[in-house]
Amino acid sequence: TSAGHAHFIKPDTDEAKPLFHKIVPQGKDIQDFVALQYGDSKDHTNFFLLVQLTPFSVSLYRQDSLEDGPVMTMNADDMMHFEIRRTKDDAEGEEESNAEKQETQPEDAQDAKDPQKEIVGYWEDGLAIYADGTREEKEVINTE
């Protein structure tokens, strides 16, 4: 597929396989990558954008110096956080579900997650520290 002076490349074509084998890191499956070749004009494509799908990362290469490695890499250490987008209807259903869960919790557990208390920080374990000096308590699940 082409759009102006950009060209989408899939690794499953015979002409693309040597290129993907050249730049995809050793031991990685080339089928987990796609690329976009682009530049200043249709005849002068001087950049190669390599996208790894799982885990997501993006690397930018100069077409004339692929052997030198990427000019820039984003999310190489797989530290990027992604949020799942939901429609408003999905969010309302989730709020109702959370309200039902809170109704079935003991009163002590509800106090620990009181939305009216001002949170001033978090402990290392991720539990809230409130402005009044209290701390969110870890929920203990009895397996007996």
Image: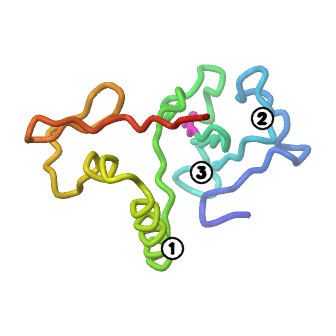
Q: Mark 3 points at which residue?
A: 38
Name which quarter of the figure residue 19 lies in: top right
Determine whether label 1 and label 3 are within 8 Å by CB: no
Q: Which residue is drawn at 51% across and 73% down?
A: 90
Q: Which amino acid does label 3 sit on?
A: Tyr
Label 1 or label 3, whichever comes before in sequence order: 3
Q: What stretch is highlighted in magenta?
A: 57-61
* SS assignment for the magenta stretch, majority: strand
Which numbered tag is attached to residue 19? 2
In the rendered image, which residue does mark 1 sit on? 90
Percent across and percent down for residue 115 are 23, 56
Dot 1 or dot 2: first in sequence order is: 2
Q: Is residue 67 above or below residue 118?
A: above
Q: Position of residue 14 (x, y in %)?
A: 91, 44
Residue plotted at (62% across, 31% down): 64
- Sort mark 2 into few (<14), some (14-19) or many (20+) by Cα contacts within 10 Å: few
